[in-house]
Amino acid sequence: MSASSAGPTGTAVPPASSYLDAEPGAWESVPDALGHFGAFGGRFVPEALMAALDELSAAYEQARTDPAFVAELDGLLASYAGRPTPVTEARRLTGHIGGARLLLKREDLAHTGSHKINNVLGQCLLTRRMGKTRVIAETGAGQHGVATATACALLGLECVVYMGEEDTRRQALNVARMRLLGAEVIPVTSGSRTLKDAINEALRDWVATVERTHYCIGSVMGPHPFPMLVRDFQRIIGVEAREQVLALTGRLPDAVVACVGGGSNAMGIFHRFIPDASVRLIGCEAGGDGLATGRHAAAIAGGSSGVLHGMRSYFLQDDDGQTKVSHSISAGLDYPGIGPEHSWLHETGRASYRVVDDTAAMDALALVAKTEGILVAIESAHAFAGAFDVARELGPDATVLISCSGRGDKDVDTAARWFGVLPTDGGEAARD
Amino acid sequence: MANRIDERLAGLAAGGRKGLMTHVVVGYPSLASTSALILAMDEAGADFIELQIPFSDPLADGPTIQSACEAAIARGARVQDAFTIAAECSGRVRAPLLFMAYANTVYRYGTEAFCRDAAAAGISGLIVPDLPTEAARHEGYFEACRRHDLHNIVTLAPTSTSDRMTVNASVASGFVYCMSRQGVTGAQLGLAPDIQAYLRRVRGHLAVPMAVGFGISDRARLEQVLPYCDVATVGSALIDRLAGTEPGDVTGQADTTRAFLRTLTPALA
């Protein structure tokens, strides 16, 4: 069933299974059989992983058309993950910004606190279907690691999470969460000791253990079929949101705005809207200290085409192709690349990408908290900051849908330090 | 002019000998020592020498080569240095030289330019561990290698299915590089338990000679694989021995390398 058949008067959110019912259209031609989104994507991995990627592609092709698989995933998304997540109209925030009507897709309300659960439930069911018993994952901020540990606990799978040593210190609480959920967390001490190196280490583990292990990649990145697979499992965000916005406003939004690190929440909310030519798709990359300082994580705005982590895409790199270290206050966006479908959407012009620096994101976080009573993740705060500009540009007759991809509980420590609101700081001495 | 890899393989076959391929990371322990190590390896009887161009994210490599790459880059090694060193050494050694480079290094340089300049520097073959056959075809890599008389060395792994062996055999040139086990490079982990059956399976698919690498740390392991292959590769074990030397002690590094290789070469006869 096509989700677009429901009109403005529709109130029912479509069943979760419509995430797999991709509507036909030109945008469905990507990726091709080898995983190319135009010039991007593909499979750049050692031969030792090629058979496993073929196996995964075949298993996914079978699963997506198997009613039993779809029903089991739908059941978990509804009864365990808490889908559909609502769309919230942000009235006070809209008034404060003085532009377009702001609507929030509330992935922060999904189980484990972000959209990451959508993807891991799908991949962990696939793992079981392939007869594998061990799941490995990389994590930056810890959200994908926590989600993977959760799904593995639920499905009785062994779980190992690779996390940069630097990040295990910055996100100690999420390390504890993963361990409580029964996962083994391995601090990565190679390279820059952050997300990029955690991915390298997970890939190295996978090469050695591929016969019994599935690598549950957390974003729309990596070698084919991962960018497609993760997009498809996240696509439900946009499928639900499109119906919800139509029901609420009677028309499509004028813009959809999401933050982009690897870009899974953005691909998830964008994908259903790609055929809707009137809807602007806008990704917000992390600008760190500012694009001009070179200390940022904006792969499209400040990077160039390259090959890393199994894919061709945009990366931060020097003239020799050595990866540069990225910088962002948001550990989840602190990655020197971006998923290949985003690079393609950028190159075709179907989506546009903006840069939001640390300060703008933190200001947005504070404003959303005080006007709407929602403490969003710092990652998501980048989307809000970008959306405020978009809302002012489009004016009060427009509607802007924002992907509120995660909740900010994990970021309380960082935010408290940024704004100086810990009791030891003297309370109200906010930094602004 | 024949490719030097072919000449060396023909020589090995004619003499009933097995070959030894050795490995340097360009710029490790220093740029100054790289040339000295290549000359020392040649002198000690290496049949093929791989020059690895250091990359920031060497995902097919274990801790030894990761650290060597990191150190080389930190000490200022550039991609261009690999071409300079190859040009300096290729005329002075008997062993054919190969580049081992990650896909991004080749892509950023430009596939055609990389192959052209490598050939001009006296390189005889390329190993790109994260460029599987399908991607290599898509990049026009095989044509570029052929245009410049470079052998593209394809890799096979224990998990390579029969279909994949057939696909890889169809594009193999020079020799194939068989991973002795699933995993990353490194001397510590040893060989796959079923290595003999696996290498026999590879042999059944291939018309070209077979090199085996990963985990060949000493003469005992070397003797274990030699009956089933044509060329054995020693990489991390050599680099592990350099880790104990002073970075500036070029002579000491060359001596250490020669001494270690001379413990291995008697097994080849």
Image (cartoon, coloured by chain):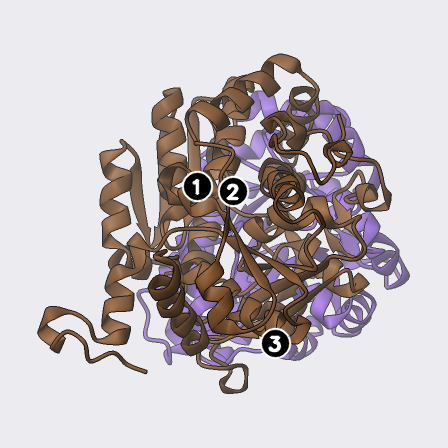
Amino acid type assigned to the residue bearing label 1 in the image: Ala
Mark 2 vs mark 1: which is more N-terminal?
1
| Mark 3, secondary structure of its residue | helix
- Residue A184, quarter of picture: top left
Up/down of A431 relative to A283, above or below: below
The quadrant of the rendering that contains the C terminus of chain A is bottom left
Instruction: Indicate which disc residue A302 carries.
Output: 3
Q: Residue at x 84, y 53 (%)?
A: B142
Q: Which chain is brown?
A: A
Q: Nearer the viewer, residue A81 or B103?
A: A81
Q: How much space separates mark 3 and mark 1, taking CA atoms?
A: 27 Å
Amino acid type assigned to the residue bearing label 2 in the image: Ile
Mark 2 vs mark 3: which is more N-terminal?
2
- Residue A405: horizontal and vertical position, in percent? 48, 51
Horizontal relation, residue A146 to residue A102: left or right: left
Mark 2 = which residue?
A: A217
Q: Which chain is purple?
A: B
- Residue A230: horizontal and vertical position, in percent? 59, 40
Asked if labels 1 and 2 touch by Cβ distance under 8 angstroms, the answer is yes
Instruction: Indicate which disc residue A137 carries.
Output: 1
Q: Same subunit under labels 2 and 3?
A: yes
Label 3 lies in what chain? A
Label 2 lies in what chain? A
> Mark 2 Cα within 10 Å, few/some/many (few <14, many 20+)?
many
Note whether residue B91 is visible. Answer: yes
Front position among marks 3 and 1: 3
Q: How much space separates mark 2 and mark 1, taking CA atoms?
A: 6 Å
Q: Nearer the viewer, residue B155 or A10?
A: A10
| Mark 2, secondary structure of its residue | loop
> Mark 3 Cα within 10 Å, few/some/many (few <14, many 20+)?
some
Q: Residue at x 39, y 57 (%)?
A: A377
